[in-house]
Amino acid sequence: MGETITLTAKDGVTISAYVATPKTKPRGGIVVLQEIFGVNHHIRAVTDLYASHGYLAIAPALYDRVEPGFEVGYLPPDIQRGSDVVQKVKREKTMLDIAAAIAYAKTAGKVGVVGYCWGGTMAYASACHLAGLSAAVGYYGGGIAAMKADTPQIPTILHFGELDKHIPMDNVNAI
């Protein structure tokens, strides 16, 4: 359903992004932010799903600055590999890349951001620091508690799992 395009961030760096367009006029845009596993088969499927519901959906490859084309699955070695790569990523550069995706999605109207895992944390950071968004959704963003001094500038909803061993409930309650 989708295709890979190239985005140019404000600092001139290019990254790839997976874009899925609806069959009808878009209802708006959605920026889909990846887990630590890159823009893999699951994130592309999620992006396609949003497009099937009428949204122009774009998933920027947020690891392209440090490891272009990075994509792994969900096995234990993949978790370790994704964890290693995310440590190399600089948040301020990631925000530039997300801003480029927002600008692209703006052609469809209002834009929301949704993120999963590390992408959930980046969705929260986007809600706090980036212009051009109308709403933000974060799923199991483990780094959000460390950003509690930051305030979202748009409607934001965060989802966590009670039994998620990776994000202690103390962190969730602190948000």
Image (spheres, rainbow, N blue to C red):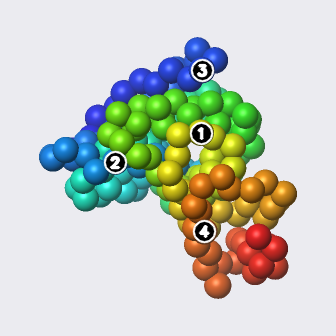
Q: Are marks 3 and 4 in contact (CB under 8 Å)?
A: no
Residue pointed to by mark 2? 28
Q: Which element type, helix, strand or loop, lies under badge 3?
A: loop
Q: Nearer the viewer, mark 4 or mark 2?
A: 2
Distance from the alpha carbon under mark 1 to that under mark 3? 13 Å
Q: Nearer the viewer, mark 1 or mark 3?
A: 1
Residue pointed to by mark 1? 131
> Which callout, 3 or 2, points at the residue further toward the start of the chain?
3
Residue pointed to by mark 4? 158
Which one is in front, 14 or 99? 99
Residue 30 in view (yes/no):
yes
Distance from the alpha carbon under mark 3 to that under mark 4? 28 Å
- Specify the farthest residue to the bottom: 162
Q: Which element type, helix, strand or loop, lies under badge 1?
A: loop
Determine crowd level at label 1: few under 14, some 14-19, many 20+ residues with C-alpha closer than 10 A.
few
Q: Amino acid at mark 3?
A: Lys
**Quadrant of the frame with the C terminus:** bottom right
Question: Image point 46% across, 25% down: which residue?
Answer: 7
Q: Is residue 74 above or below residue 169?
A: above
Instruction: Answer left or right for 170 relative to 57.
Output: right
Distance from the alpha carbon under mark 4 to that under mark 1? 19 Å
Q: Are marks 2 and 1 in contact (CB under 8 Å)?
A: no
Residue 61 percent across, percent down from the top left: 50, 37
Q: Which element type, helix, strand or loop, lies under badge 2?
A: loop
Which one is in front, 120 or 124? 124
Q: Amino acid at mark 4?
A: Leu
Instruction: Answer left or right for 126 relative to 146.
Output: left
Distance from the alpha carbon under mark 4 to that under mark 2? 21 Å
> Which callout, 2 or 1, points at the residue further toward the start of the chain?
2
Question: Image point 73% across, 60% down: which residue?
Answer: 144
> Which callout, 3 or 4, points at the residue further toward the start of the chain?
3
Q: Amino acid at mark 1?
A: Ala
